[in-house]
Amino acid sequence: MDLDELLLLDCFAYLEGVLAFVFFVLLSYVGSPYGRYSWQHPGVQVPARPAWFLQELPSMVWPLYECVRPAAARLSNLPNRVLLAMFLIHYIQRTLVFSVLIRGGKPTPLISFIGAVLFCTFNGYLQSRYLSQFAEYADDWVAQPCFLTGGLFEYVTAANYLGEIVEWCGFALASWSPSGGAFALFTISTLLSRARQHHQWYHEKFEDYPKSRKILIPFVY
């Protein structure tokens, strides 16, 4: 049974990687249908605060569930606990803190809300189950260069897309797993198109917007 679930998790990781490319292409054409662009997508809308809370909630509940389960086989190992804690802390902030701090946020189209709930449920299961049940790391993994390079995401404080991309690429390096890599790839594909959409919006709305300002990576892109 354990081997069957591990195979399922690997398949899910590769599926998430493929979906990253699909969504990148799709969002490059239709844009990101939420926030300041939600008006472009008529239909049922969900208020910003409950939408954000509910869509992020599954990715907070999954690791909490794994932490309290007595059968969480790998959580006796320090690297697994640290990595799962990184994931959990991020989603505690997004679910319980950021949703409360929203002031006058734009409503989210129902289709975007449903998609976000499905992704957070899917990815929350993938990351939490892999780290709690299957991921094997040496006892000194937290001292290895790969982990230390990725664990630097704890120092990211800027609330921008580059910060989140750095964060989850760091998580992927630290976990060195297909599931972590797939999540980082999906994050890049969705936020890159979102950043490009923002860049275009600012240039259209503000005539004096700096022409030399890059989209996402300073001096590069």
Image: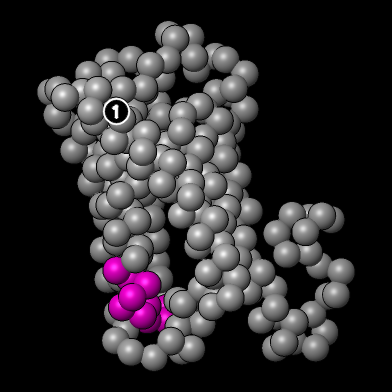
Residue 27's place in the image compared with 144, above or below, is below
| In the image, residue 111 lies in the stretch drawn in magenta | yes
Quarter of the figure that contains the C terminus: bottom right
Q: Residue 107: x and y, percent? A: 37, 81
For image coordinates 46% across by 33% down, the residue present is 178
Residue 95 visible within the image: no
| In the image, residue 203 lies in the stretch drawn in magenta | no
In the visual, does 143 lie left or right of 97?
A: right
For image coordinates 58% across by 49% down, the residue present is 165
Spot the residue most to the left: 70
Residue 136, by quadrant, is top left
Residue 171's place in the image compared with 138, above or below, is below
Under mark 1, the amino acid is: Leu
Residue toward you, 217 or 130: 130
Q: Which residue is mark 1?
A: 6
For image coordinates 87% across by 69% down, the residue present is 212
SS type, badge 1:
helix
Residue 191, by quadrant, is bottom right
Residue 67's place in the image compared with 27, above or below, is above
Residue 60's place in the image compared with 54, above or below, is above
For image coordinates 82% across by 84% down, the residue present is 208
In the visual, does 38 lie left or right of 51?
A: right
Residue 110, by quadrant, is bottom left
In the visual, does 195 lie left or right of 122?
A: right
Q: Residue 80: x and y, percent? A: 36, 23
* Colour treatment of the image: one colour
Q: Residues within 10 Å of mark 1 (few under 14, many from 20)?
A: some
Q: Residue 77: x and y, percent? A: 33, 15
Residue 155 visible within the image: yes
Q: Residue 76: x and y, percent? A: 27, 15
Q: Which residues are magenta?
A: 105-114
Spot the residue most to the top: 139
